[in-house]
Image (tube, rainbow, N blue to C red):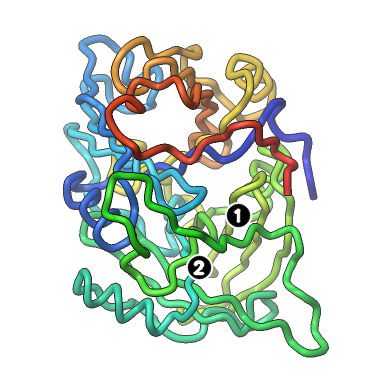
Amino acid sequence: MTGPGIPGAQRVDHVALTVADLDAATAFAVDVLGGEVVYRLPPLARTDDWMSEHLDVPPRATAEIALIRLGPTTNLELFQYAVAGQVTAPPQRHDPGHQHLGFLVADVAEATAAVGRLSGLTPQDPGPAAGGRSPLAGACRARFRTPWGLAFELRSPPEPAPHGPPAPAARHRPDGPWTNRGARPPGPPPITGLRGVDHIGYTVADLDEALTVFADALGGELLHRGVEADPDGPVEVAALRMGPTDNVELRTFAHTDRAAPPPRNCDVGGRHLAIHVRDVDAAARHLAARPGFTVLGAPETIDDGPIAGDRWVYVRSPIGLHVEVVRMPDGALPYERTTAARRAPAGALSWTDR
């Protein structure tokens, strides 16, 4: 299942998460996950309806935003919103809209010990990751949740069975190096054996509908679909290769409330996925023509601040996930004058690069 995708798509630009405390989230991303703060934007607020029209949040919401580089290929965009009626409890694993990051590590036990030493967090369910008919059967993982809203897991891949099928050749496998670029002291990441972000994970209400969005509309390549054994019961799971540098894993739990709405962008646990494209306007027109997709406002170019020159627009998808199409002129952004840290760039990449 490989669809046409977005014309001019290059790579996943960033994964975004709304958190309860931006300072705590930034500190954790740097001190525990080994990330680098690339920039932090001035507070965003408007007195008109711009926030509602472009970000799908209440019009008087205010936002603070930081961009964190995680390893060789991943940009994590963190939001903290202030808004009346904000939901402060993030969705649980089985709730539609739940998002997690999966990190590939050399040894889960060693990495788990490092997380505990650095943060005091203990895993929610350590042990074997996947059973049943999943191609990941035999992998090991440990899952965590931070007090400010990030769910993440540490995963070591299973060794190929002597007579079994190999892992999908097209899956992106992060293998470092986890290079520092000036925003933190040089050296290895704090978590032992950390290689990179292995996948972005989403819980979805309907796996078939979600695959239509990710594989057809966004151009993901379906790697496998199966069933995992889980402490909460069987889980339908599908994994996709999303461009040259990312994997997405989709899950639907047996007891997922399929009618439950996903979190809003301004709620803790709100999220969006950004795709870097060569032409934002053409990408927006393409998505606007697809059933169930709604472009929020019109593409805009930021004209001042650390990322002046960034052109972007949000698009609401049929599964409630917001997709941002964005183009950033790497090498010409104002933040680059004040720090050696850099966003993971799109450069000359194309979506089909392997």
Q: Amino acid at mark 1?
A: Asn
Question: In the rendering, at what x and y percent does residue 336 appear?
Answer: 36, 28
- Residue occupying image coordinates x 46% and y 64%: 103
Within-10-Å neighbours for mark 1: few <14, some 14–19, many 20+ = many
Q: Amino acid at mark 2?
A: Leu
- Residue occupying image coordinates x 31% and y 20%: 51
- Residue occupying image coordinates x 26% and y 9%: 48
Which residue carries the number 2 mark?
A: 104
**Label number found at residue 71:** none
Question: In the rendering, at what x and y percent does residue 281 appear?
Answer: 60, 14
Q: Is residue 256 left or right of residue 34?
A: right
**Label number found at residue 247:** 1
Badges 1 and 2: C-beta atoms under 8 Å apart?
Answer: no
Q: Nearer the viewer, residue 334 or 259?
A: 334
Ranked by sequence position, the earlier of labels 1 and 2 is 2
Q: Is residue 342 left or right of residue 49?
A: right
Tell me how far mark 1 sits from mark 2, CA to CA: 12 Å
Q: Nearer the viewer, residue 230 or 277?
A: 277
